Amino acid sequence: MAHGEFLRQHSDDPELASHVMHDYRTADLDPQTRGMLDYAFKLTSEPSGVHRDDFAHLEELGLTHEQILSVVLITCVFNFMTRLADGLGVEPAEGRQEWVESWLSGPAREQEWLLQPKS
């Protein structure tokens, strides 16, 4: 949630940031962005399941080796920081959790895509 909130605050597209926070698969994304997010999701949720084919798919989408390395490093850094904070029992900054909860129970409900059933 903290990363999604950061994206909402610093993005030129807060609706896209909201999609990414909740389920990027519901967003209208170009194939490269969707591919990067699919890869980052897989690397996060099942790292031992990532294979050469996943890397090749990103190449087919037009990503350079440097861009793929950036996707991997950014994913790793965010995962590391999340696990570090969780492992040390770091709590969100005062007011941060309340802000996220108020957004989820208020403005988030006004976004139709959040209410659509997942396919």
Image (spheres, rainbow, N blue to C red):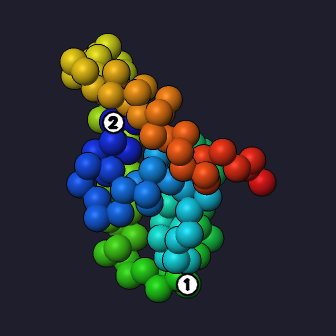
How far, Cα to Cα, is label 1 from label 2? Answer: 32 Å
Q: Which residue is mark 1?
A: 60
Q: Is disc 1 surrounded by few (<14), some (14 to 19) or many (20+) residues within 10 Å?
A: few
Q: Earlier in the sequence, mark 1 or mark 2?
A: 2
Q: Which residue is mark 2?
A: 2
Residue 11 in sight from this viewpoint? yes
Picture coordinates of residue 27, whole percent (x, y): 56, 62
Q: Is residue 63 left or right of residue 90?
A: right
Picture coordinates of residue 18, whole percent (x, y): 45, 50
> Is 77 located above or below residue 82 in the figure?
below
Q: Amino acid at mark 1?
A: Glu
- Residue at the image position 33 percent from the left and 28 percent from the top: 99
Residue 84 found in image quarter: top left
- Residue at the image position 28 percent from the left and 26 percent from the top: 96
* Count of numbered circles on the image: 2
Q: Is residue 117 left or right of residue 7?
A: right
Picture coordinates of residue 92, whole percent (x, y): 28, 22
SS assignment at label 2? helix
Q: Nearer the viewer, residue 104 or 110?
A: 110
Quadrant for the N terminus in the image: top left
Q: Amino acid at mark 2?
A: Ala
Q: Is disc 2 surrounded by few (<14), some (14 to 19) or many (20+) residues within 10 Å?
A: some
> Is 78 located above or below residue 11 in the figure?
above
